[in-house]
Amino acid sequence: MNAIINDIEIIKAKTTKINDVDFDNLKFGHVFSDHMLECNYKDGKWHAPKVVPYHPITLDPSAKIFHYGQSVFEGMKAYKDADKNVWLFRPLDNFKRLNISSKRLAIPELPENYFMDGLKALLEVDKDWIPTNEGSSLYIRPFIFASGNGFHASPADEYKFIICTAPSGAYFSGELRVLIEEKYSRSANGGVGFAKAGGNYAGQFYPTQLAIEKGYQQVIWTDDNTHEYIEEAGAMNIFVRINDTLITGPTSDRILDGITRKSIIELAKAEGIPVEVRKISVSEVVEAAKNGSLKEMFGAGTAAVISPIAGFGYKDVDYELPKLDDTYASFLKKRITDIQTNKVEDPFGWRFEVK
Amino acid sequence: MNAIINDIEIIKAKTTKINDVDFDNLKFGHVFSDHMLECNYKDGKWHAPKVVPYHPITLDPSAKIFHYGQSVFEGMKAYKDADKNVWLFRPLDNFKRLNISSKRLAIPELPENYFMDGLKALLEVDKDWIPTNEGSSLYIRPFIFASGNGFHASPADEYKFIICTAPSGAYFSGELRVLIEEKYSRSANGGVGFAKAGGNYAGQFYPTQLAIEKGYQQVIWTDDNTHEYIEEAGAMNIFVRINDTLITGPTSDRILDGITRKSIIELAKAEGIPVEVRKISVSEVVEAAKNGSLKEMFGAGTAAVISPIAGFGYKDVDYELPKLDDTYASFLKKRITDIQTNKVEDPFGWRFEVK
Ligand SMILES: Cc1ncc(COP(=O)(O)O)c(C=O)c1O
Ligand SMILES: Cc1ncc(COP(=O)(O)O)c(C=O)c1O
């Protein structure tokens, strides 16, 4: 049963849970595949990862993850084409970003082969878990956390790097309405906002709950100093279309450098859509909404792909976006998912076959 | 062997580790007592806590603590006096702050009796672990983390509240030199800096490592927007003495409302020391260091008690603090620890007997 794939040792699960899964009604990140990749940092180095059965993790109560939030993660997807070939989208960018996040969180950086070979071996073992239904995919969650012990507020001496996968449907259901935040914020100048650090997400939950109570699904974060500039959403970068120009904010140490975002910028440029990467003020968006030049807003991220925004709230006023027939959002979503799922040529070299 | 104390069920450990502990050479938060308090949030409510043997925690790899940093904690100490009576210091303030932190992190708030009765029962069971050596105490770590599962970036549906204790010596060893931060920052306006959220600490590790490489032990955080105002240190609030006036910054949504800090303010006032609670600019401190009016700087927190700062670095220049014979730091440290350890009267009603 056990084997080696790409130098990675495989310990196979004795049974499979796949027959319990309703692939036609997948939620997001709710059921998990039979295996996971596990890799430990100990005695000053990362040790070779293994594919092992999906299993619980046992930690001392003093493990630093419980106390000091020392963790980073990534989000990726695997797609299966009509010929059952398996594809990833720009996976090296996720690997590099994981190490960028790790560095900022004082977590030891991971060797590229442990990430890439480990991921490929895991997908090979669990390839039956990759959904083929339109709009579904295998969501991939690489994460690293401090498993070393002790109450001293300092970096741990042991870490675990794990990849789990979850066959998943859409991240948002229904229309997406967002609240532009005036009080709370997501990240500081000189902080960890550009990293996919666990703590960045927990900090968003409470303000997001307040927004949900008011009838929105998401908060659009603004800069923490003036709340005048639009930054990003919970797990999405934000695009605004004013007349025919597509605008998105520049990345900074407060904003995640999204792979979907940068792909959309390139795709739009290649399609002749005018694109501006510059600060977007809330007043500009409100003004554009009032005078009718605001045509679209959408979020962009691996989990949410491209999610059109139907309306936004700001200072107790709600603004509706127009309902257009041909939107940049639907056009670009089709372009990017067609590339991801090997339905069209990939002139950018983004697609990555797992074999 | 099992029992009920204060309504709390006790499951006793079969053996004790206490004979392995060298109470004369305690590090900080490195060895853990025989028992812990464990309390679970499930099906929409907190269930009665139990004192159980210190034991590992088992979680699904998708538990939200690993991904989204949803955790909060507290830091307290228990002291034993000459008559073996056990004392806490302002424990209700820790309880209240834990719930303030929880609320901001979208964690369900804890009932007061689960915290207080649970803590008292735990200390009763492990009272032999409370050190009596000068400068040592039983460090108490209450913490709550998201144990519920799923990759959706939203609050968990299950949590664990745990209290562990660790007989501990001094937090810092040797002289404390600090670096006033010009680039990185700890928290945002509208963020979670005022909460004892796990992620706030991991974000400090990397800049602190950089400071350590330069020969400092700690970073003094400044505001994220201008880096002109002194905020706090890793796990301490900061006091500055200019001439005879003791100054500390006001708390805000970026700064933890330290129990040591507010006790020192009250103690100093009661002793007739002029105290100012106001913003402190870095340039004011540098200027005072240059003209000799800067007499002292110290950090204040439960773990570090009062830790005098011997010198600070700012923009590549090092400033030495004078070596005075009678310092506010040593005077106030003696006052506060004498109250904590029941050596003197407690006119403030801060001491709390565990019985
Ligand atoms: C905060 C944040 N912004 C943006 C994104 C989008 O990034 P990507 O397109 O690489 O998934 C994500 C999610 O990954 C995120 O967590
Ligand atoms: C960030 C921070 N500031 C200040 C303090 C000091 O607070 P207290 O005196 O309540 O321990 C702590 C530690 O508890 C802390 O973590």
Image (cartoon, coloured by chain):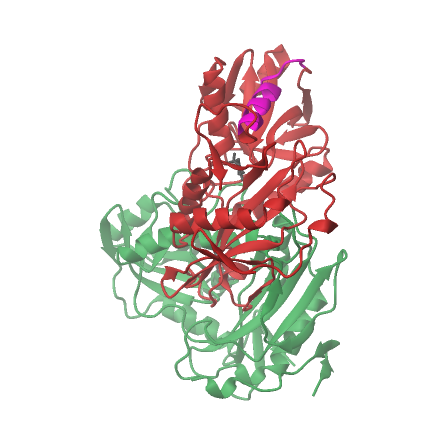
Chain colours: A green, B red
Q: Is residue B241 above or below residue A276?
A: above
**Residue B215, x across and y down, in percent:** 73, 33
In the image: residue B316, left or right of residue B338: right
Decide whether the magenta segment is chiefly helix, strand or loop: helix
Question: Can you give x and y, in whole percent of width and height, for residue B207 in the image?
Answer: 63, 41
The answer to whether one can see residue A247 in this image is yes
Pick the residue in front: A182 or A331: A182
Up the image or down, B132 lies above or below A10; here it is above
In the image, the segment drawn in magenta is B324-339
Q: How many marks?
A: 0
- In the image, A69: left or right of B153? right
The N terminus of chain B appears in which quarter of the rendering? bottom right
| Residue B251: percent from left, percent from top | 44, 31
The stretch drawn in magenta includes residue B326: yes
The quadrant where residue B312 appears:
top right
Q: Is residue B109 magenta?
A: no
In this rendering, does residue B198 appear at all? Answer: no
- The residue drawn where x is 58% and y is 15% is B287
Query: Which of the two residues, A316 or B280, is positioned nearer the viewer here?
Result: B280
Q: For this rendering, which residue is in front, B304 or A36?
A: B304
Residue B303's x, y, as percent?
59, 37
What residue is at 50 percent from the left and 81 percent from the top? A343
Residue A28 horizontal side relative to residue A347, left or right: left
Q: A73 or B352: nearer the eye?
A: B352
